[in-house]
Amino acid sequence: MIADVSGETFDQAFMRVRDMDASLDEQLRAFSDATRQKRPDFAAAVDRLVERLRRYGAGDAAPQAGEPMPSFVLPDDAGHMVSLGQLLTQGPVAVTFHRGHWCPYCRININALAQAHRDITVEGGQIVAIMPDRQKFVAEFKSQSNVPFPILTDMDNGYALSLNLTIWVGAEMQKMMEGDRDLPTFQGNSSWMLPIPATFVVGRDGLIKARFIDPDYRKPVAIASMLAALRS
């Protein structure tokens, strides 16, 4: 049963869903339902975008399991440069891509990753999150959300572009988001491009053990599958 959330703001709906005693999938579905009730036009536009991305195979050309994960050197929230090679000396890594600190679905997914962080580190694994937001927004988000793993800034989506993981939101979505989600300020450019949500589990040898890519950002991060890949 879908709750009547007609009187809620999006921030209120996010806080309600974030604090639910429910699975990640249930939390994301609840927020999606709230959005669909409050902004059916926006939800329908997202549906059309996702259908179009699936039709054209968005993300399919990203590196595959068994291939080397292309290296990166990106700044963290404190401005320190972090490289994939450096991380792999400490163990396998789950490299996760997120649209930005402003995206409630990303925040819910990252919160779930933060909760799973202990289990992942006990297994000898690591998480690193990558998003195109400028450092000051990443630092604020990491501090407010108590995220225990690095969040790196991918300026202008450069690394995501190299992996064939970047999309333009399209004219319809851009028009709907303008005035509400200030991507040009958050990213420092006016491209209106975003990464496709994705996770790559990379072994210490630099090879991709598994990848999980879904152009529908409303879907949950595959934490159980990610854990299984890190253990393998």
Image: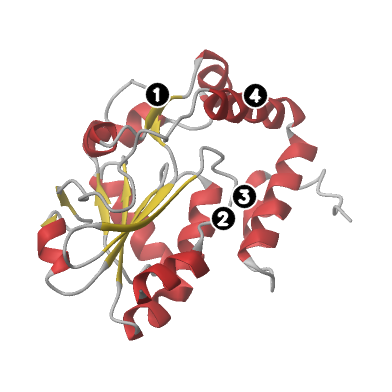
Residue 71 as seen in the image, left or right of residue 102: left
Amino acid type of the residue tagged 1 in the rendering: Trp
Amino acid type of the residue tagged 2 in the rendering: Pro
How busy is the neighbourhood of tag 4: few (under 14 within 10 Å), some, or many (20 plus)? Answer: some
Check disc 2 and report its element: helix, strand or loop: loop
Quarter the N terminus occupies = bottom right
Amino acid type of the residue tagged 4 in the rendering: Arg
Check disc 4 and report its element: helix, strand or loop: helix
Q: Considering only order in the chain, which callout, 2 or 1, is on the residue closer to the N terminus?
A: 1
Q: Residue 68: x, y in percent?
A: 20, 50
Residue 48 is marked as 4
Q: Is residue 14 above or below residue 64?
A: below
Viewer-side label of 4, 3: 4
Viewer-side label of 1, 3: 1
Q: Residue 230: x, y in percent?
A: 35, 71
Q: Nearer the viewer, residue 146 or 127?
A: 127
Check disc 1 and report its element: helix, strand or loop: loop
Residue 231: quarter of image = bottom left
How busy is the neighbourhood of tag 1: few (under 14 within 10 Å), some, or many (20 plus)? Answer: some
Residue 136 as seen in the image, left or right of residue 195: left
Find disc 2 in the rendering and name its residue: 220
